[in-house]
Image (cartoon, rainbow, N blue to C red):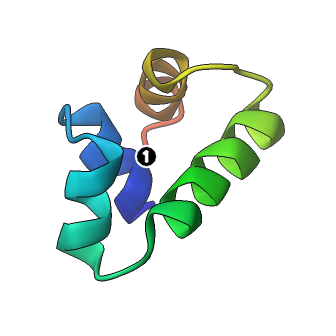
């Protein structure tokens, strides 16, 4: 959920990996997996869905 929170705040992938001390690949994989689970296909939609679900 940290990845989603940072994405919704406008952080880029590189900024997220620096903040969370993970690799760029990890951030991308988390984003992909969340998108698949929530049936959305981009970062904006992930942020909107997270808001709808009260995750952020």
Query: Which residue is nearer to you in this view: 53 or 34?
Result: 34
Residue 45 drawn at (x, y percent): 53, 17
Furthest-bottom residue in this view: 21
Q: Residues within 10 Å of mark 1 (few under 14, many from 20)?
A: few
- Hey, which quadrant is residue 12 in on the image? top left
* Left/right of residue 19 with respect to residue 33 in the rendered view: left
Residue 51 drawn at (x, y percent): 40, 28
Q: Vertical placement of 30 versus 32: above or below? A: below
Query: Which residue is nearer to you in this view: 2 or 14?
Result: 14
Q: Vertical placement of 5 versus 26: above or below? A: above
| Label 1 SS | loop
Q: Vertical placement of 46 versus 3: above or below? A: above
Residue 19 drawn at (x, y percent): 18, 70
Residue 6 drawn at (x, y percent): 26, 49
Residue occupying the point 43% across, 38% down: 54
* Left/right of residue 40 with respect to residue 48 in the rendered view: right
Residue occupying the point 45% across, 62% down: 24
What quarter of the picture does the N terminus occupy?
Answer: bottom left
Numbered-mark total? 1
Residue occupying the point 53% across, 28% down: 46
What quarter of the picture does the C terminus occupy?
Answer: top left
- Hey, which quadrant is residue 3 in on the image? bottom left
* Left/right of residue 53 with respect to residue 3 in the rendered view: right
Tag 1 residue: 55
């Amino acid at each position: 959920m940290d990845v989603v929170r940072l994405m919704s705040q406008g952080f880029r992938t590189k900024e997220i990996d620096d903040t969370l001390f993970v690799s760029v690949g990890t951030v991308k994989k988390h984003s992909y997996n969340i998108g698949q689970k929530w049936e959305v296909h981009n970062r904006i939609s992930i942020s909107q869905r997270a808001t709808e679900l009260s995750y952020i």
